[in-house]
Image (tube, rainbow, N blue to C red):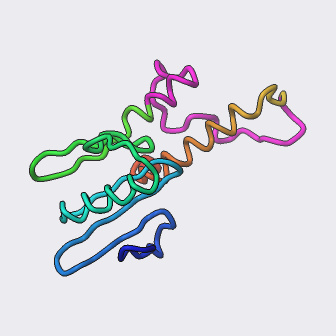
Amino acid sequence: MTHGFNHSSADHSLFMKFTNSACTTLLVYVDDIVHAGNDLTGIQHITTLLNQTFIIKDLGDLTYFLGLEVARNSTSIHLCQRKYTLDILSDTGLLACCPSSTPMDYKASLTSNTGTPLTDPFAYHQLIGRLIYLTNTRLDITQYNT
C-alpha cells in the first residue's frame, strides 16, 4: 500500500500504481510476485525495495505462473494452459482418452445411497479444484457446442 500502489477492487492480490503515462502492477500469490508495467525504472525501484525487505530472487521474464504459460514477442503476449491441462490428464490417467461431447450418460440417475464411496476423497477434491481453476481461467472450454 505504500510507495503509491493501490489495492485493486477487482482482485485482492493485485496492486497498481499509475503516474502520468506510467503504469506498474504487482500480482502477489503466497510467495510469488509478478510485476509488470511500462515504466522500467519503476519496476526496478519496486524490485529493489522488495529485495531490501524480503530478500527476493528475480527469475527474469515471466514464463510460467499459476498454471499459465506466458510467451512474449515484440507485439504481443500469449497465455496458454496446455501444460496445466496435460498435467491434469496425466495425473488422472486420462491422457490417452478421446474427447466426448457428453462424458457420461446424461440420463443416469444419481442418488446418495447408490455406488461405492471413494476410499480417498482428497484426490477427487483436488481434481475438482484444479478443474474449477481451469474453467475459471479458460471460459471458452466450458461453452456448450451444438
Question: Looking at the image, which residue sits at the far bottom?
Answer: 20
Q: Quadrant of residue 42?
A: bottom left
Q: Quadrant of residue 65?
A: top left
Q: Is residue 64 left or right of residue 144?
A: left
Q: Name the residue: 56% across, 34% down.
A: 103
Q: Is residue 100 magenta?
A: yes
Q: Quadrant of residue 49?
A: bottom left
Q: Position of residue 70 (x, y in %)?
A: 29, 43
Task: From this view, report whether residue 74 is shown above or below residue 23.
Answer: above
Q: Position of residue 80 (x, y in %)?
A: 32, 42
Say how many tags the image has: 0
Task: From this view, report whether residue 121 is shown above or below residue 58.
Answer: above
Q: Is residue 38 magenta?
A: no
Task: From this view, report whether residue 94 is shown above or below residue 28.
Answer: above
Front one among 20 and 80: 20
Question: Looking at the image, which residue sits at the far left?
Answer: 74
Q: Position of residue 118 (x, y in %)?
A: 80, 29
Magenta range is: 86-115
Q: Name the residue: 73% across, 34% down.
A: 122
Residue 48 seen in the current view: yes
Q: Name the residue: 37% across, 61% down.
A: 26
Q: Position of residue 17 (x, y in %)?
A: 32, 73
